[in-house]
Image: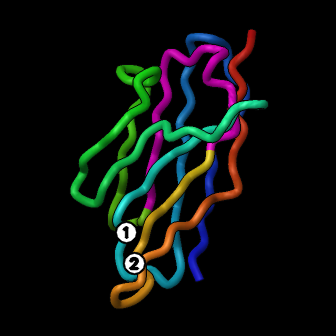
Amino acid sequence: QVQVVESGGGLVQPGGSLRLSCAASGSIFGIVVMGWYRQAPGKQRELVAAITSGGNTNYLDSVKGRFTISRDNAKNTVYLQMDSLNPDDTAVYYCNVDVWIGINRRQDYWGQGTQVTVSS
């Protein structure tokens, strides 16, 4: 079994910063991709940023230049540094990890979500 635990959400004023963390643990043979998604009320869940084991990254256009994703492979942890936040970034942020759980067995897991609210 694999556990995914997020932390770091909260309330921040426009223009402020937050850092999200997500740690994966359990029966993991290797991590393929770690990513952050978000879902605002009444909207579909969308990919915010993702990073592969090799360090390749992908970002939602609206967060490019403001958000930075990074990972610590030794700790199976991924981070999302969010700067210049604006009210449109308000959402529940979910961590997703795509992992090898056995030979030729690949599975993705979700965290419980962490609320990010940008408001004055």
Image quarter hosting the N terminus = bottom right
**Would you place residue 88 above or below residue 40 in this image?**
above
The residue range painted magenta reads 77-93
Image quarter hosting the C terminus = top right
Q: Which mark is residue 98?
A: none
Is 99 in front, or is 114? 99
Q: Which mark is residue 100?
A: 2
Answer whether residue 24 is magenta in the image.
no
Residue at the location (43% across, 40% down)? 49
Residue at the location (42% across, 65% down)? 76
Q: Position of residue 16 (x, y in %)?
A: 57, 17
Residue at the location (38% across, 23% down)? 64
Q: Position of residue 113 (x, y in %)?
A: 69, 49
Tags 2 and 1 touching, CB below 8 Å: yes
Amino acid type at mark 2: Trp
Look at mark 1 in the image and give the residue it sits on. 31
**Would you place residue 80 above or below residue 77 in this image?**
above
Q: Looking at the image, tell me whether mark 2 or mark 1 is earlier in sequence order.
A: 1
Q: Position of residue 14 (x, y in %)?
A: 63, 11
Is 1 in front, or is 19? 1
Residue at the location (30% across, 42% down)? 57
